[in-house]
Amino acid sequence: MGMEMVSIIIYFVIIFGVFYFIGIRPQKKERKKQEEMLASMAIGDYVLTTSGFYGQIIDMTDDMVIVEFGNKNCRIPMKKGAVAAVEKDGTKSGPASSDNK
């Protein structure tokens, strides 16, 4: 009966290890990458929001950014967490490149 208990414990440890390496660890890496991206944002960078809009950062505070979309009159404040991707000024591409004329 002692060997059965040991094998059950080993089975649960293996299951937990698989869940850790498949689910928890990649999520932590992705969260760290997102935090680094948000920390590297600066005024003048082009961003892609989580709703799919491209715009340029014109002002920032600790947890908010003001993004200008296309028209000079369309400025929207939003949380930094709403930014999905950052394109630095020298490496902008796609629709954001035609905004700055």
Image (cartoon, rainbow, N blue to C red):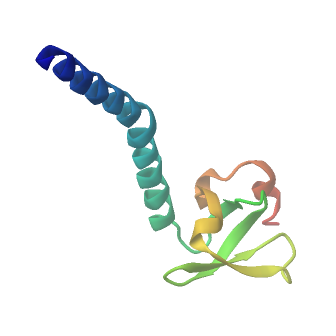
Left-right relation of 14 to 1: right
Instruction: Residue at 53% x, 84% y: name it.
Output: 61
Instruction: Residue at 41% x, 45% y: name it.
Output: 29
Quarter of the image for the N terminus: give it: top left
Residue 24: quadrant of the picture: top left
The residue at the far left in this view is: 2
* Residue 44 in picture, x, y percent from top left: 62, 71
Left-right relation of 96 to 11: right
Residue 67: quadrant of the picture: bottom right
Left-right relation of 49 to 101: left
* Residue 60 in picture, x, y percent from top left: 57, 81
* Residue 82 in picture, x, y percent from top left: 65, 66
Camera-side residue: 53 or 32? 32
Quarter of the image for the C terminus: give it: bottom right
* Residue 37 in picture, x, y percent from top left: 49, 58
Instruction: Residue at 47% x, 47% y: name it.
Output: 30
Placement of 28 over or under 12, stated as above or below: below
Camera-side residue: 93 or 24? 24
Camera-side residue: 53 or 90? 53
The residue at the far front in this view is: 1
Placement of 96 over or under 14, stated as above or below: below
The tally of labels here is 0
